[in-house]
Amino acid sequence: MERIVDCNQLQQFLNYCRLCGADNPDKVPIFEEDEELFGDVAPLWKKIEECVAIQVCKNDQMPQEICLQCIDKVNDFFEYRAVCAATDSQTRAILNVAPDEPESVMVKTIWR
Ligand SMILES: [Zn+2]
């Protein structure tokens, strides 16, 4: 069966939130023209890539905005990741435990 999607439908998809797919009118662009102005620790696109593990590129023919709910989630999760990483390195320093290689972590998990 041939799938017919007209241009209006395609255009509509581009207006949805890139992350949750909701048709939320309150959205912000993933890529700011001048990211330096915001003085943030990481640009939004980088936070998205690191937190939800999807690739986002400027002008990649995918939706270029995310909704305000998603931006809150991404920011919260990015901060949470930073807290976890800081706790991990502090705890390792106190207990004098070197970070494991990913492979040895897997082996330990399997044998527990
Ligand atoms: Zn969203």
Image (spheres, helix red, strand yellow):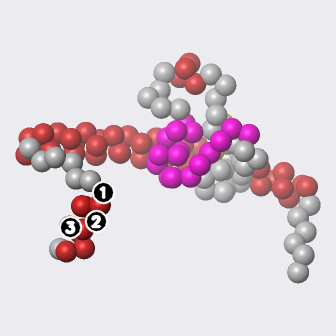
* Circles 3 and 1: CB atoms closer than 8 Å: no
Compute the Cα span from label 2 to label 3. Answer: 5 Å
Q: Residues within 10 Å of mark 3 (few under 14, many from 20)?
A: few
- 36 or 23, which is in the foreground? 36
Which mark, by number, is residue 108? 3
Compute the Cα span from label 2 to label 1. Answer: 6 Å
- Across and down, in percent, residue 88 comes to 22, 45
Q: Residue at x 59, y 49 (%)?
A: 55
- Across and down, in percent, residue 34 comes to 62, 22
The kind of residue on which mark 3 rests is Lys
Helix or strand or loop: what does disc 2 sit on? helix
Magenta segment: 44-59
Q: Residue at x 90, y 69 (%)?
A: 4
Residue sticking out furthest to the left: 95
Which mark, by number, is residue 56? none
Residue 1 drawn above or below residue 84: below
Report the residue marked by disc 1: 102
Report the residue marked by disc 2: 106
Q: Residue at x 25, y 73 (%)?
A: 110
The number of discs equals 3
Compute the Cα span from label 3 to label 1. Answer: 10 Å
* Circles 2 and 3: CB atoms closer than 8 Å: yes
Figure quadrant of residue 13: bottom right
